[in-house]
Structures are given as structure tokens and as C-alpha cells.
Image (cartoon, rainbow, N blue to C red):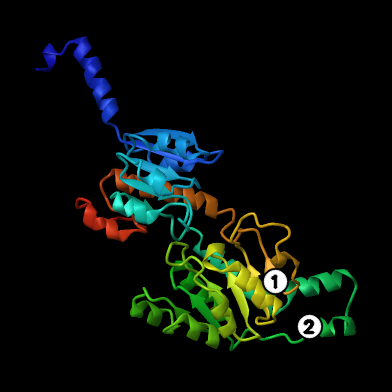
Amino acid sequence: NTNKITPFIKIELQRRNLMNKPKVALISPGNPNSDLIREQLKEIEHEFDEYICNSEGETIEAIKGVDVIINQGVPMPDSVIREIDTAQAIVSMGHGFNQIDHESATEQSVMVVNTAGFVTEEVSNHTIMLILACARKLTILNKLTKQGKWGKDTRNALMPMPTVTDQTLGLVSLGNIGRAVARKSQALGMKVISYDPYLQPWIAREYKVHMVSSLEELAQESDFVSMHTPLNNQTRKLVGSEFFKSMKSTSYFINTCRGGTVDEKALIKALQGNELAGAGLDVFEEEPTSPENPLLKMDNVIVTPHSAGSSNRSGAAGETQIGQETARILKGSWPMSLVNPEVRSKLEIRLPATRA
């Protein structure tokens, strides 16, 4: 009987309702940005807290007692994951999720969610740019032109200059970004092949990509190789000296995914030994890379500072997507982009993911 509820009981019920609200913790190494994330959650009763975390201890304290962790670039190794007590999911800002031990999260029955797709167009455009810049020797010719060198002064630098049309592009992994690169490179007249042992064959047919059976076969057949695999325990240093030895001496290597997927020392050695014609790199094993890195001193290597996904649009799109994925989880749905789907067998049945 509500007429018999005393003011004290009303206060206690309000306190309990507040305590029962789902809790969201945003963790960031500095300057968290949450306005667009909060906008996606405005219709859901919840508590939202932000934490700057620059140590494992700070991270562990921040994630205690929450329902969803939003991670804007904070390392979460096994030692942190094991301290999760109530969180259903970690929603990671970005396409890559290598800062999170997703295998440990699966063991702890925690979903790991990324924002796949929000930089697909930017990264694929950057990849095409690096392919063209390598083939057309853009940085070399830019330097010579600014020095006032024309005609015979540039002829030796120009040749050999491969065409892009009719060349073979080999994609290591055919996920969202790889498929966009395939579509755009085919518009340039390139033949596209790929190695991806996890890909359903009908996807390759849809994108007119010929699948090869091994990395070695891909290296041997390609005039350009482009990396598009996530970084995890299975892909760390996925390509190395044997891969580069299998590549044509006239071929180029492109990497816009994660530097750790490549044995960087082996790449340097291959370039120094003229096993490759050049490379276009947006990522490195260690970032920021050392100014003394030999890759920065080679005329046939074009480098950018892990900026392939950057644009006026992508930052806002990523934050919006984080908010939408968090909203799905709080409503009891599966997220759209679950990077450890094997965790499903450990969790209660949830509603299907739906578009926002």
C-alpha cells in the first residue's frame, strides 16, 4: 500500500533504484571524450563515470562494479582482465583491439567489442594512396622537383616505374577494410588475391577476389602486398623473412593495420638487401618509432604516423558507434561487432543485435 510508505522508506527506495542503475565506466590514458557517446545513451537509465588510467592499479579500480567498460586506448592485459568482477563487456575505441587480452576476456565470460567499420573508407583510401605513391615514386620525385631537377636529372630516379593497372595486389586478410581495398584497387585495373583462412568462400566470390592457400603463394604471386589483419597472439609477426624472400624483387609491401603483424627487423633486412622494391608504412612495431629507425632513412620507403584512419568524420563516427554498442549491451542485446564470438557459449541468451 503506497499510502503507508513513510518518507524514510521513499528515500531508501530511491537509493536502491539509483544503486540498481547499470554503470558505465569510460577509461582513457588522458583527455577522455564522451559527448557523442553519452548522446547515444540518453534514453537509458544509467550511471556514467570517466577515469584517466595510466597504471594497472588505476585501471583495476576504475572497472570494479561496473556493467560496461568503454576503453579509449588503455592497456588491459590478463592481469587486469582477471580483476573484472561485474562487467559484461569491454567496448574498445578503434578497429584494432590489441591492447586488450581478448582471450583472457573470453575465459572471464566478458564480451570484447570494437568499432569495426568506422574507419573502413579512410584506411582503405590511405592504402590505395600508399600503393600509388610507391608505384609512382611520389616522395622521390617530390624531393627532386623541389630541388629544381627535371628531365635527364630525374630519368634515373623514374625508372623502373611499374604500372598499377594489370598488377596483382595480395591482401593478407579480407575483412571490412581488405574488401574496401579490393573494390577500390579493382577500379584501377588491378587483379586481387587474398590469404584469409577464416573467410567464408562466398564473400571472396562477391568481391571478385581469388583466394590462395598460403602466405607463401600470396607473396610469390603479388606485385603489391597489403596487410589488413588484426593484431593478436595468432598474427603477431605473421610475416617475416621467409615471406619477404618469397616476394618478387620488384614488389612493394604496404602495412596500414598494426606494426606488430610484421617482423620489422626482417622487413628492414629485406629492403636493405633489395629483396623488395619498396614499402609504404603507416604502422610500426613500436610507436612512436625511433628517429633512428632505418625505415625512416630509405628513399624507397614512404611512411605516415599511424594516421590512416584519421579524418574529420571518423572520430565522431567512432564515438557514436561506441555509444550505440554500449546501448545494445545495456538493453540486453548482442553487440554488432563482437570480436570474441566464442564467448557466446558462456553467456545467457541475449536479443539479436539491431541497427540503431
Residue at 74%, 73% in the rendered image:
138
> Which of 45 and 155 lies nearest the eye of the viewer?
155
| Mark 2 Cα shell of 10 Å, populated few (<14), some (14-19), many (≥20) | some
Q: Pick the quarter of the image with the N terminus.
A: top left
For marks 1 and 2, give the one nearer the viewer.
Answer: 1
Question: Which residue is painted at 73% across and 60% down in the image?
Answer: 292
- Circle 1: element type: strand
Q: Is residue 73 visible?
A: yes
Determine which residue is flagged by label 1: 301
The disc labelled 1 sits on which kind of residue?
Answer: Val
Which of the two labelled residues, at mark 1 and mark 2, occupies the earlier sequence position? Answer: 2
Left or right of 303? Residue 74 is left
Depth order, front residue of 268/68: 268
Q: Secondary structure at mark 2?
A: helix
Residue at 62%, 69% (x, y): give it. 265
Residue 40 x, y percent position in the rendering: 40, 43
Let me know if residue 186 appears in the view.
no
The residue drawn where x is 32% and y is 42% is 87
Amino acid tagged 2: Leu
Give the tally of numbered discs. 2
Q: In the rendering, which numbered label is found on residue 158?
A: 2
Residue reaching furthest to the right: 148
